[in-house]
Image (cartoon, helix red, strand yellow):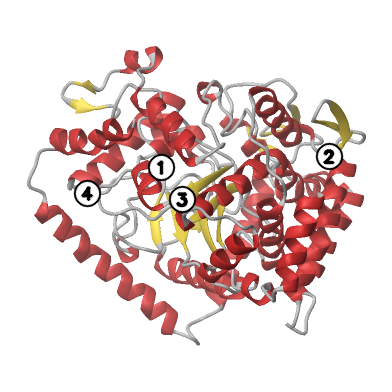
Amino acid sequence: MSPLAEARLQRLADTGLAQVLQRCRKGVEKEALRVTRDCALATTRHPPALGSALTNRYITTDFSEALLEFVTPAYTSTWETLQFLCDIHQFVYQQLDNELLWAASMPCLIEADEAIPVARYGDSNVGKMKTVYRLGLGHRYGRMMQTISGVHFNFSLPEEFWDHYQELEKDTGGSQEFRSASYFGLLRNVRRMGWLVLFLFGNSPAICKCFTDGAKPGLEEFDKGTFFMPYATSLRMSDLGYKNTAQAALDISLNNIDAYVETLLKAVSTPNRDFQKIGIKADGEYRQISANILQVENEYYGLIRPKRVTRSGEMPSRALKRRGVEYVELRALDVSLNDPAGINQNQMRFLEAFLIYCLIEDSPLLDAREIAQTESNQLLVARQGREPGLTLSRHHGQLLLTNWADEICGRLVAICDLLDEGTGSSLYRDALELQREAIRDPGLTPSAGILAEMKRSGESFFSIARRISEQHRDYFLSLGKDDSARLDFLAAEAAASIERQKKIEASDRISFEAYLQNYFSQAEQLI
Protein backbone atom coordinates (compact mmCIF):
# COMPACT_ATOMS: atom_id res chain seq x y z
CA MET A 1 0.00 0.00 0.00
CA SER A 2 1.38 3.40 -0.90
CA PRO A 3 2.17 5.85 1.92
CA LEU A 4 -0.82 7.91 0.78
CA ALA A 5 -3.22 4.96 1.02
CA GLU A 6 -1.76 3.91 4.39
CA ALA A 7 -2.24 7.43 5.74
CA ARG A 8 -5.82 7.56 4.45
CA LEU A 9 -6.68 4.20 5.97
CA GLN A 10 -5.10 5.16 9.28
CA ARG A 11 -7.09 8.39 9.40
CA LEU A 12 -10.28 6.43 8.72
CA ALA A 13 -9.45 4.01 11.52
CA ASP A 14 -8.44 6.76 13.97
CA THR A 15 -11.68 8.70 13.46
CA GLY A 16 -13.93 5.68 13.98
CA LEU A 17 -15.11 5.48 10.39
CA ALA A 18 -14.78 1.69 10.33
CA GLN A 19 -18.44 1.35 11.23
CA VAL A 20 -19.34 3.77 8.48
CA LEU A 21 -17.38 1.70 5.95
CA GLN A 22 -19.29 -1.34 7.10
CA ARG A 23 -22.42 0.28 5.64
CA CYS A 24 -21.25 0.27 2.03
CA ARG A 25 -24.07 -0.69 -0.30
CA LYS A 26 -23.90 -3.71 -2.60
CA GLY A 27 -26.26 -4.72 -5.38
CA VAL A 28 -26.10 -7.36 -8.10
CA GLU A 29 -27.35 -7.61 -11.68
CA LYS A 30 -27.21 -11.18 -12.95
CA GLU A 31 -27.97 -12.40 -16.47
CA ALA A 32 -29.11 -15.89 -17.46
CA LEU A 33 -30.34 -17.43 -20.70
CA ARG A 34 -33.62 -19.28 -20.72
CA VAL A 35 -33.11 -22.62 -22.44
CA THR A 36 -35.27 -25.60 -23.34
CA ARG A 37 -35.08 -28.97 -21.59
CA ASP A 38 -32.54 -29.94 -24.28
CA CYS A 39 -30.58 -26.77 -23.47
CA ALA A 40 -31.21 -25.10 -26.80
CA LEU A 41 -31.94 -21.39 -26.67
CA ALA A 42 -35.56 -20.73 -25.77
CA THR A 43 -37.48 -18.97 -28.54
CA THR A 44 -40.56 -18.29 -26.42
CA ARG A 45 -41.57 -14.77 -25.46
CA HIS A 46 -40.69 -13.30 -22.08
CA PRO A 47 -42.99 -15.17 -19.65
CA PRO A 48 -46.05 -12.97 -18.85
CA ALA A 49 -45.97 -14.08 -15.19
CA LEU A 50 -42.63 -12.24 -14.85
CA GLY A 51 -44.30 -8.95 -15.68
CA SER A 52 -43.14 -6.23 -18.05
CA ALA A 53 -39.49 -6.37 -19.07
CA LEU A 54 -39.72 -2.60 -19.57
CA THR A 55 -40.87 -1.64 -16.08
CA ASN A 56 -40.30 -4.54 -13.65
CA ARG A 57 -37.68 -3.26 -11.19
CA TYR A 58 -36.19 -6.68 -10.46
CA ILE A 59 -36.75 -8.95 -13.48
CA THR A 60 -36.11 -7.73 -17.00
CA THR A 61 -34.37 -8.83 -20.19
CA ASP A 62 -31.07 -7.82 -21.70
CA PHE A 63 -30.39 -8.34 -25.41
CA SER A 64 -32.73 -11.21 -26.12
CA GLU A 65 -36.22 -12.28 -25.08
CA ALA A 66 -34.39 -15.34 -23.76
CA LEU A 67 -31.74 -13.41 -21.81
CA LEU A 68 -33.17 -12.65 -18.38
CA GLU A 69 -31.61 -10.06 -16.10
CA PHE A 70 -32.19 -10.10 -12.35
CA VAL A 71 -31.62 -6.87 -10.42
CA THR A 72 -31.37 -6.67 -6.63
CA PRO A 73 -31.70 -3.52 -4.55
CA ALA A 74 -28.47 -2.31 -2.93
CA TYR A 75 -28.07 -3.56 0.64
CA THR A 76 -25.43 -2.97 3.30
CA SER A 77 -25.27 -6.72 3.94
CA THR A 78 -23.95 -9.19 1.37
CA TRP A 79 -26.33 -11.74 2.86
CA GLU A 80 -29.37 -9.57 2.11
CA THR A 81 -28.20 -8.99 -1.46
CA LEU A 82 -27.65 -12.69 -2.07
CA GLN A 83 -30.97 -13.62 -0.42
CA PHE A 84 -32.89 -11.25 -2.67
CA LEU A 85 -31.11 -12.68 -5.72
CA CYS A 86 -31.97 -16.22 -4.62
CA ASP A 87 -35.59 -15.20 -4.09
CA ILE A 88 -35.76 -13.88 -7.65
CA HIS A 89 -34.40 -17.19 -8.96
CA GLN A 90 -36.92 -19.14 -6.91
CA PHE A 91 -39.80 -16.97 -8.12
CA VAL A 92 -38.72 -17.21 -11.76
CA TYR A 93 -38.36 -20.98 -11.65
CA GLN A 94 -41.90 -21.25 -10.32
CA GLN A 95 -43.10 -19.43 -13.47
CA LEU A 96 -41.03 -21.25 -16.09
CA ASP A 97 -42.65 -24.01 -18.10
CA ASN A 98 -40.11 -26.81 -18.58
CA GLU A 99 -37.28 -24.33 -19.14
CA LEU A 100 -33.91 -23.96 -17.44
CA LEU A 101 -31.69 -21.02 -16.64
CA TRP A 102 -28.32 -21.64 -18.26
CA ALA A 103 -25.69 -21.70 -15.52
CA ALA A 104 -22.68 -20.53 -17.54
CA SER A 105 -21.57 -17.20 -18.99
CA MET A 106 -20.86 -18.56 -22.45
CA PRO A 107 -24.06 -19.53 -24.26
CA CYS A 108 -25.74 -22.86 -24.88
CA LEU A 109 -26.65 -24.53 -28.18
CA ILE A 110 -27.60 -21.84 -30.69
CA GLU A 111 -28.06 -22.78 -34.33
CA ALA A 112 -27.51 -19.38 -35.91
CA ASP A 113 -27.66 -15.65 -35.30
CA GLU A 114 -31.13 -15.36 -36.74
CA ALA A 115 -32.41 -17.95 -34.23
CA ILE A 116 -31.82 -15.50 -31.37
CA PRO A 117 -34.97 -13.48 -30.63
CA VAL A 118 -34.31 -9.80 -29.87
CA ALA A 119 -35.96 -8.45 -26.72
CA ARG A 120 -39.25 -6.58 -27.14
CA TYR A 121 -40.47 -3.85 -24.81
CA GLY A 122 -43.86 -2.86 -26.14
CA ASP A 123 -45.19 0.02 -28.24
CA SER A 124 -44.12 3.05 -26.22
CA ASN A 125 -41.37 5.29 -27.53
CA VAL A 126 -39.01 4.28 -24.75
CA GLY A 127 -39.82 0.61 -25.38
CA LYS A 128 -39.23 0.97 -29.13
CA MET A 129 -35.91 2.67 -28.48
CA LYS A 130 -34.73 -0.22 -26.30
CA THR A 131 -35.71 -2.75 -28.99
CA VAL A 132 -34.21 -0.83 -31.92
CA TYR A 133 -30.98 -0.37 -29.95
CA ARG A 134 -30.76 -4.16 -29.58
CA LEU A 135 -31.51 -4.70 -33.25
CA GLY A 136 -28.59 -2.39 -33.92
CA LEU A 137 -26.30 -4.40 -31.66
CA GLY A 138 -27.19 -7.50 -33.63
CA HIS A 139 -26.42 -5.84 -36.97
CA ARG A 140 -23.17 -4.35 -35.68
CA TYR A 141 -21.60 -7.19 -33.72
CA GLY A 142 -23.77 -10.24 -34.40
CA ARG A 143 -26.44 -11.55 -32.09
CA MET A 144 -24.35 -14.43 -30.81
CA MET A 145 -22.00 -12.16 -28.87
CA GLN A 146 -24.99 -10.56 -27.16
CA THR A 147 -26.06 -13.87 -25.59
CA ILE A 148 -23.05 -13.93 -23.27
CA SER A 149 -24.13 -13.64 -19.63
CA GLY A 150 -22.37 -11.90 -16.78
CA VAL A 151 -22.75 -10.59 -13.26
CA HIS A 152 -22.48 -6.88 -12.45
CA PHE A 153 -21.53 -5.81 -8.94
CA ASN A 154 -22.91 -2.40 -7.97
CA PHE A 155 -21.08 -0.61 -5.16
CA SER A 156 -21.32 2.68 -3.34
CA LEU A 157 -19.96 4.15 -0.13
CA PRO A 158 -22.51 5.39 2.42
CA GLU A 159 -23.62 9.02 2.40
CA GLU A 160 -22.14 9.70 5.85
CA PHE A 161 -18.72 8.53 4.65
CA TRP A 162 -18.25 11.32 2.17
CA ASP A 163 -18.43 14.37 4.43
CA HIS A 164 -15.97 12.80 6.87
CA TYR A 165 -13.64 11.66 4.09
CA GLN A 166 -13.63 15.06 2.39
CA GLU A 167 -12.78 16.69 5.71
CA LEU A 168 -9.96 14.19 6.33
CA GLU A 169 -8.63 14.93 2.85
CA LYS A 170 -8.75 18.67 3.62
CA ASP A 171 -10.65 19.23 0.38
CA THR A 172 -12.53 22.53 0.31
CA GLY A 173 -14.36 22.08 -2.98
CA GLY A 174 -17.96 21.11 -3.59
CA SER A 175 -19.15 17.83 -2.12
CA GLN A 176 -20.51 16.52 -5.42
CA GLU A 177 -17.27 17.32 -7.22
CA PHE A 178 -15.20 15.67 -4.48
CA ARG A 179 -17.30 12.53 -4.52
CA SER A 180 -17.18 12.18 -8.31
CA ALA A 181 -13.42 12.79 -8.41
CA SER A 182 -12.91 10.13 -5.74
CA TYR A 183 -15.02 7.62 -7.62
CA PHE A 184 -13.08 8.33 -10.81
CA GLY A 185 -9.86 7.60 -8.92
CA LEU A 186 -11.42 4.26 -8.00
CA LEU A 187 -12.33 3.64 -11.66
CA ARG A 188 -8.78 4.29 -12.84
CA ASN A 189 -7.34 1.89 -10.28
CA VAL A 190 -9.81 -0.81 -11.27
CA ARG A 191 -8.65 -0.34 -14.82
CA ARG A 192 -5.08 -0.85 -13.63
CA MET A 193 -5.77 -3.84 -11.38
CA GLY A 194 -9.07 -5.26 -12.62
CA TRP A 195 -7.28 -8.16 -14.28
CA LEU A 196 -7.21 -9.67 -10.76
CA VAL A 197 -11.01 -10.09 -10.87
CA LEU A 198 -10.68 -12.10 -14.09
CA PHE A 199 -7.94 -14.26 -12.61
CA LEU A 200 -9.79 -15.04 -9.39
CA PHE A 201 -13.39 -15.26 -10.60
CA GLY A 202 -13.20 -15.97 -14.33
CA ASN A 203 -15.22 -19.08 -15.12
CA SER A 204 -15.27 -19.33 -18.90
CA PRO A 205 -12.12 -21.10 -20.14
CA ALA A 206 -14.14 -23.19 -22.60
CA ILE A 207 -16.89 -22.54 -25.13
CA CYS A 208 -19.25 -24.48 -27.35
CA LYS A 209 -18.05 -24.56 -30.95
CA CYS A 210 -21.36 -23.08 -32.06
CA PHE A 211 -20.16 -19.77 -30.59
CA THR A 212 -17.41 -19.47 -33.20
CA ASP A 213 -17.34 -19.69 -36.98
CA GLY A 214 -14.33 -21.96 -36.74
CA ALA A 215 -11.10 -22.38 -34.82
CA LYS A 216 -9.70 -19.13 -33.44
CA PRO A 217 -6.03 -18.43 -32.68
CA GLY A 218 -4.97 -20.10 -29.45
CA LEU A 219 -8.10 -22.25 -29.08
CA GLU A 220 -7.67 -25.97 -28.69
CA GLU A 221 -10.19 -28.69 -29.37
CA PHE A 222 -11.40 -30.65 -26.34
CA ASP A 223 -13.98 -32.72 -28.19
CA LYS A 224 -16.20 -32.37 -31.25
CA GLY A 225 -18.30 -29.71 -29.56
CA THR A 226 -15.85 -27.79 -27.36
CA PHE A 227 -12.99 -25.34 -27.78
CA PHE A 228 -10.88 -24.28 -24.80
CA MET A 229 -7.67 -22.55 -23.82
CA PRO A 230 -5.61 -24.44 -21.24
CA TYR A 231 -4.74 -21.42 -19.08
CA ALA A 232 -7.73 -19.17 -19.86
CA THR A 233 -9.70 -17.55 -17.07
CA SER A 234 -12.46 -15.64 -18.85
CA LEU A 235 -12.98 -16.02 -22.58
CA ARG A 236 -16.08 -13.90 -21.98
CA MET A 237 -13.79 -10.94 -21.28
CA SER A 238 -11.35 -11.75 -24.08
CA ASP A 239 -11.36 -10.76 -27.73
CA LEU A 240 -13.67 -13.76 -28.29
CA GLY A 241 -16.29 -12.12 -26.08
CA TYR A 242 -16.91 -8.49 -25.22
CA LYS A 243 -13.47 -7.21 -26.16
CA ASN A 244 -14.44 -6.97 -29.81
CA THR A 245 -12.37 -5.13 -32.40
CA ALA A 246 -15.20 -2.74 -33.27
CA GLN A 247 -14.67 -0.85 -29.99
CA ALA A 248 -10.92 -1.36 -29.71
CA ALA A 249 -10.13 2.16 -30.93
CA LEU A 250 -12.50 3.91 -28.52
CA ASP A 251 -10.71 6.17 -26.07
CA ILE A 252 -13.17 6.83 -23.25
CA SER A 253 -11.37 8.86 -20.61
CA LEU A 254 -11.57 8.00 -16.91
CA ASN A 255 -9.49 10.97 -15.83
CA ASN A 256 -12.47 13.03 -14.66
CA ILE A 257 -16.21 13.26 -15.11
CA ASP A 258 -16.02 16.01 -17.74
CA ALA A 259 -13.54 14.10 -19.89
CA TYR A 260 -15.57 10.91 -19.50
CA VAL A 261 -18.80 12.55 -20.64
CA GLU A 262 -17.08 14.42 -23.47
CA THR A 263 -15.37 11.34 -24.95
CA LEU A 264 -18.44 9.16 -24.52
CA LEU A 265 -20.78 11.65 -26.17
CA LYS A 266 -18.28 12.21 -28.98
CA ALA A 267 -18.59 8.50 -29.77
CA VAL A 268 -22.40 8.77 -29.62
CA SER A 269 -22.30 11.72 -32.04
CA THR A 270 -19.60 10.65 -34.54
CA PRO A 271 -20.62 8.66 -37.66
CA ASN A 272 -18.96 5.31 -38.35
CA ARG A 273 -18.44 4.27 -41.96
CA ASP A 274 -19.12 0.57 -41.37
CA PHE A 275 -22.29 1.26 -39.42
CA GLN A 276 -23.48 3.70 -42.09
CA LYS A 277 -23.48 0.76 -44.50
CA ILE A 278 -26.03 -1.00 -42.27
CA GLY A 279 -28.42 1.90 -42.67
CA ILE A 280 -30.81 3.39 -40.14
CA LYS A 281 -33.88 1.91 -41.81
CA ALA A 282 -34.66 -0.77 -44.39
CA ASP A 283 -38.10 -1.07 -45.97
CA GLY A 284 -39.41 1.41 -43.43
CA GLU A 285 -38.21 -0.62 -40.43
CA TYR A 286 -35.48 0.57 -38.07
CA ARG A 287 -32.24 -1.41 -38.14
CA GLN A 288 -30.41 0.71 -35.54
CA ILE A 289 -30.88 3.96 -33.66
CA SER A 290 -28.04 5.73 -35.44
CA ALA A 291 -25.02 5.03 -37.62
CA ASN A 292 -22.61 6.58 -35.10
CA ILE A 293 -19.74 4.86 -33.31
CA LEU A 294 -22.08 4.21 -30.39
CA GLN A 295 -25.87 4.23 -30.68
CA VAL A 296 -26.19 5.10 -26.98
CA GLU A 297 -23.72 5.40 -24.13
CA ASN A 298 -24.40 1.91 -22.74
CA GLU A 299 -23.13 0.35 -25.95
CA TYR A 300 -19.61 1.01 -24.72
CA TYR A 301 -18.44 -2.00 -22.78
CA GLY A 302 -16.12 -0.95 -19.98
CA LEU A 303 -14.68 -3.09 -17.20
CA ILE A 304 -16.33 -0.69 -14.76
CA ARG A 305 -18.68 2.26 -15.18
CA PRO A 306 -19.59 5.36 -13.17
CA LYS A 307 -23.36 5.35 -12.62
CA ARG A 308 -26.18 7.64 -11.57
CA VAL A 309 -29.85 6.65 -11.53
CA THR A 310 -31.48 8.43 -14.47
CA ARG A 311 -34.83 10.12 -14.71
CA SER A 312 -37.35 9.28 -17.43
CA GLY A 313 -35.88 10.10 -20.84
CA GLU A 314 -32.59 11.33 -19.36
CA MET A 315 -29.26 10.39 -20.93
CA PRO A 316 -26.84 8.75 -18.46
CA SER A 317 -24.19 11.37 -19.23
CA ARG A 318 -26.57 14.19 -18.46
CA ALA A 319 -27.43 12.56 -15.13
CA LEU A 320 -23.73 12.27 -14.28
CA LYS A 321 -22.99 15.88 -15.23
CA ARG A 322 -25.95 17.22 -13.28
CA ARG A 323 -25.79 15.15 -10.12
CA GLY A 324 -22.42 13.40 -10.09
CA VAL A 325 -21.44 9.77 -9.61
CA GLU A 326 -23.79 7.82 -7.34
CA TYR A 327 -22.23 4.36 -7.52
CA VAL A 328 -19.96 2.22 -9.68
CA GLU A 329 -20.87 -0.87 -11.69
CA LEU A 330 -18.15 -3.54 -11.92
CA ARG A 331 -18.89 -5.61 -15.01
CA ALA A 332 -15.97 -8.05 -14.99
CA LEU A 333 -17.60 -11.03 -13.25
CA ASP A 334 -18.42 -14.27 -15.04
CA VAL A 335 -21.45 -16.18 -13.83
CA SER A 336 -20.20 -18.60 -11.18
CA LEU A 337 -21.06 -22.14 -12.23
CA ASN A 338 -20.55 -23.35 -8.67
CA ASP A 339 -23.21 -21.08 -7.15
CA PRO A 340 -26.94 -21.44 -7.89
CA ALA A 341 -27.37 -17.65 -7.89
CA GLY A 342 -24.22 -17.09 -9.99
CA ILE A 343 -22.27 -15.32 -7.21
CA ASN A 344 -21.50 -15.90 -3.54
CA GLN A 345 -20.87 -13.80 -0.45
CA ASN A 346 -17.12 -14.43 -0.38
CA GLN A 347 -16.83 -12.95 -3.87
CA MET A 348 -18.86 -9.91 -2.84
CA ARG A 349 -16.83 -9.37 0.33
CA PHE A 350 -13.55 -9.59 -1.56
CA LEU A 351 -14.81 -7.18 -4.22
CA GLU A 352 -16.00 -4.73 -1.58
CA ALA A 353 -12.57 -4.64 0.05
CA PHE A 354 -10.89 -4.41 -3.36
CA LEU A 355 -13.01 -1.44 -4.43
CA ILE A 356 -12.39 0.39 -1.15
CA TYR A 357 -8.67 -0.14 -1.72
CA CYS A 358 -9.00 1.23 -5.26
CA LEU A 359 -10.68 4.32 -3.77
CA ILE A 360 -8.03 5.16 -1.18
CA GLU A 361 -4.95 4.17 -3.20
CA ASP A 362 -3.09 6.85 -5.16
CA SER A 363 -4.61 7.05 -8.65
CA PRO A 364 -2.67 9.18 -11.14
CA LEU A 365 -4.33 10.18 -14.40
CA LEU A 366 -4.13 7.60 -17.18
CA ASP A 367 -2.11 8.37 -20.29
CA ALA A 368 -2.19 6.55 -23.64
CA ARG A 369 0.75 4.31 -22.74
CA GLU A 370 -0.80 3.10 -19.49
CA ILE A 371 -4.21 2.61 -21.10
CA ALA A 372 -2.63 0.35 -23.71
CA GLN A 373 -0.82 -1.46 -20.90
CA THR A 374 -4.04 -2.08 -18.97
CA GLU A 375 -5.82 -3.38 -22.08
CA SER A 376 -2.95 -5.73 -22.83
CA ASN A 377 -2.88 -7.05 -19.26
CA GLN A 378 -6.63 -7.70 -19.23
CA LEU A 379 -6.54 -9.61 -22.52
CA LEU A 380 -3.51 -11.61 -21.42
CA VAL A 381 -5.16 -12.67 -18.16
CA ALA A 382 -8.45 -13.48 -19.89
CA ARG A 383 -6.73 -15.81 -22.37
CA GLN A 384 -3.84 -17.27 -20.37
CA GLY A 385 -4.00 -15.93 -16.81
CA ARG A 386 -3.09 -19.23 -15.12
CA GLU A 387 -0.02 -19.89 -17.25
CA PRO A 388 2.97 -20.58 -14.95
CA GLY A 389 5.44 -17.71 -14.93
CA LEU A 390 3.05 -15.29 -16.67
CA THR A 391 4.19 -11.68 -16.37
CA LEU A 392 2.17 -8.47 -16.74
CA SER A 393 3.24 -4.97 -17.65
CA ARG A 394 3.49 -2.44 -14.84
CA HIS A 395 5.03 0.99 -15.15
CA HIS A 396 8.03 0.41 -17.41
CA GLY A 397 8.73 -3.23 -16.62
CA GLN A 398 7.32 -6.72 -16.17
CA LEU A 399 6.07 -8.34 -12.97
CA LEU A 400 4.95 -11.88 -12.24
CA LEU A 401 1.17 -12.01 -12.10
CA THR A 402 1.24 -14.03 -8.89
CA ASN A 403 3.60 -11.54 -7.23
CA TRP A 404 1.44 -8.57 -8.20
CA ALA A 405 -1.75 -10.37 -7.13
CA ASP A 406 -0.24 -11.28 -3.77
CA GLU A 407 0.91 -7.70 -3.32
CA ILE A 408 -2.61 -6.37 -3.90
CA CYS A 409 -4.13 -8.92 -1.53
CA GLY A 410 -1.56 -8.03 1.11
CA ARG A 411 -2.81 -4.46 0.93
CA LEU A 412 -6.40 -5.62 1.46
CA VAL A 413 -5.64 -7.16 4.87
CA ALA A 414 -6.03 -3.91 6.81
CA ILE A 415 -9.21 -3.04 4.91
CA CYS A 416 -10.76 -6.44 5.62
CA ASP A 417 -9.85 -6.09 9.28
CA LEU A 418 -11.64 -2.72 9.37
CA LEU A 419 -14.70 -4.25 7.75
CA ASP A 420 -14.66 -7.05 10.33
CA GLU A 421 -13.99 -4.72 13.27
CA GLY A 422 -16.56 -4.99 16.02
CA THR A 423 -18.61 -7.64 14.23
CA GLY A 424 -17.33 -10.59 16.24
CA SER A 425 -16.41 -12.38 13.02
CA SER A 426 -13.64 -12.54 10.41
CA LEU A 427 -15.84 -12.92 7.34
CA TYR A 428 -13.96 -10.38 5.21
CA ARG A 429 -10.54 -11.66 6.25
CA ASP A 430 -11.65 -15.23 5.52
CA ALA A 431 -12.92 -14.21 2.07
CA LEU A 432 -9.55 -12.61 1.37
CA GLU A 433 -7.62 -15.69 2.51
CA LEU A 434 -9.62 -17.89 0.13
CA GLN A 435 -8.40 -15.76 -2.78
CA ARG A 436 -4.82 -15.71 -1.52
CA GLU A 437 -4.90 -19.51 -1.56
CA ALA A 438 -6.05 -19.40 -5.19
CA ILE A 439 -3.15 -17.09 -6.05
CA ARG A 440 -0.70 -19.52 -4.45
CA ASP A 441 -2.38 -22.43 -6.24
CA PRO A 442 -4.17 -21.33 -9.46
CA GLY A 443 -5.63 -24.81 -9.66
CA LEU A 444 -8.13 -23.60 -7.04
CA THR A 445 -9.59 -20.93 -9.33
CA PRO A 446 -13.03 -21.54 -10.89
CA SER A 447 -11.60 -21.56 -14.42
CA ALA A 448 -9.12 -24.30 -13.49
CA GLY A 449 -11.88 -26.22 -11.75
CA ILE A 450 -14.16 -26.45 -14.78
CA LEU A 451 -11.31 -27.63 -17.03
CA ALA A 452 -10.23 -30.20 -14.43
CA GLU A 453 -13.80 -31.50 -14.24
CA MET A 454 -13.99 -31.76 -18.04
CA LYS A 455 -10.76 -33.78 -18.13
CA ARG A 456 -11.73 -35.95 -15.18
CA SER A 457 -15.21 -36.83 -16.43
CA GLY A 458 -14.61 -36.62 -20.15
CA GLU A 459 -17.69 -34.42 -20.41
CA SER A 460 -17.89 -31.52 -22.81
CA PHE A 461 -18.34 -27.97 -21.57
CA PHE A 462 -21.95 -28.17 -22.75
CA SER A 463 -22.63 -31.39 -20.84
CA ILE A 464 -21.20 -30.07 -17.60
CA ALA A 465 -23.04 -26.75 -17.89
CA ARG A 466 -26.26 -28.63 -18.63
CA ARG A 467 -25.83 -30.89 -15.62
CA ILE A 468 -25.13 -27.92 -13.33
CA SER A 469 -28.07 -25.97 -14.76
CA GLU A 470 -30.37 -28.87 -13.91
CA GLN A 471 -28.93 -29.07 -10.39
CA HIS A 472 -29.57 -25.36 -9.86
CA ARG A 473 -33.15 -25.72 -11.10
CA ASP A 474 -33.74 -28.62 -8.74
CA TYR A 475 -32.29 -26.62 -5.86
CA PHE A 476 -34.55 -23.63 -6.34
CA LEU A 477 -37.66 -25.72 -6.95
CA SER A 478 -36.91 -27.74 -3.80
CA LEU A 479 -37.12 -24.60 -1.66
CA GLY A 480 -40.90 -24.62 -1.83
CA LYS A 481 -42.92 -21.67 -0.53
CA ASP A 482 -42.16 -21.76 3.19
CA ASP A 483 -41.34 -18.05 3.22
CA SER A 484 -43.76 -16.66 0.67
CA ALA A 485 -43.58 -12.97 1.63
CA ARG A 486 -40.78 -12.17 -0.84
CA LEU A 487 -42.33 -14.36 -3.53
CA ASP A 488 -45.66 -12.58 -3.07
CA PHE A 489 -43.79 -9.27 -3.28
CA LEU A 490 -42.20 -10.27 -6.60
CA ALA A 491 -45.56 -11.46 -7.95
CA ALA A 492 -47.11 -8.11 -7.00
CA GLU A 493 -44.25 -6.26 -8.70
CA ALA A 494 -44.77 -8.31 -11.87
CA ALA A 495 -48.46 -7.43 -11.98
CA ALA A 496 -47.82 -3.76 -11.20
CA SER A 497 -45.15 -3.54 -13.89
CA ILE A 498 -47.66 -4.53 -16.57
CA GLU A 499 -49.92 -1.67 -15.49
CA ARG A 500 -46.98 0.74 -15.50
CA GLN A 501 -46.13 -0.24 -19.09
CA LYS A 502 -49.73 0.37 -20.17
CA LYS A 503 -49.66 3.85 -18.62
CA ILE A 504 -46.39 4.69 -20.38
CA GLU A 505 -47.79 3.56 -23.71
CA ALA A 506 -50.98 5.56 -23.19
CA SER A 507 -49.05 8.71 -22.28
CA ASP A 508 -46.99 9.01 -25.49
CA ARG A 509 -47.87 12.16 -27.41
CA ILE A 510 -45.09 12.40 -29.99
CA SER A 511 -43.75 10.22 -32.80
CA PHE A 512 -40.83 7.87 -32.30
CA GLU A 513 -38.69 10.02 -34.58
CA ALA A 514 -39.42 13.10 -32.46
CA TYR A 515 -38.70 11.12 -29.30
CA LEU A 516 -35.25 10.15 -30.60
CA GLN A 517 -34.55 13.72 -31.66
CA ASN A 518 -35.46 15.03 -28.21
CA TYR A 519 -33.37 12.35 -26.51
CA PHE A 520 -30.20 13.04 -28.46
CA SER A 521 -30.61 16.80 -28.24
CA GLN A 522 -29.33 16.36 -24.67
CA ALA A 523 -25.96 15.33 -26.09
CA GLU A 524 -25.73 18.52 -28.14
CA GLN A 525 -26.26 20.55 -24.97
CA LEU A 526 -23.47 18.70 -23.14
CA ILE A 527 -20.78 18.58 -25.83
Helix, strand or loop under label 2: loop
Residue type highlighted by circle 3: Lys
Residue 224 in the image: state x and y as whole percent. Answer: 69, 31
* Residue that lies at the very extreme toward the bottom in this rendered image: 482
Q: Which residue is mark 2?
A: 386
Q: Amino acid at mark 1?
A: Phe
Quickly name the residue at label 3: 307
Q: Sequence-wise, which precedes: disc 4 or disc 1?
A: 1
Rendered-image quadrant of the C terminus: top left
Find numbered disc 4 in the image and state the secondary structure of the residue it sits on: loop
- Asked if disc 4 and disc 3 are in contact, CB closer than 8 Å, the reply is no
Is residue 244 shown to the viewer in this render? Answer: yes
* Front one among 299 and 424: 424
Disc number for residue 122: 4
On screen, residue 162 above or below 466: below
Q: Is residue 333 visible?
A: no
Q: Which amino acid lies under the numbered mark 2 shown in the image of this protein? A: Arg
Q: Which residue is mark 1?
A: 63
Residue in the picture at 82% in, 51% down: 3
Q: Earlier in the sequence, mark 4 or mark 3?
A: 4
Q: CA distance from mark 3 to mark 2?
A: 32 Å
Amino acid type of the residue that numbered disc 4 sits on in the rendered structure: Gly
CA gap between label 4 and label 3 equals: 26 Å
Mark nearest the camera among 4 and 3 is 3
Using the numbered discs, state the Cα–Cα distance from disc 1 to disc 3 in whole angstroms: 20 Å
Query: Sequence-wise, which precedes: disc 3 or disc 2?
Result: 3
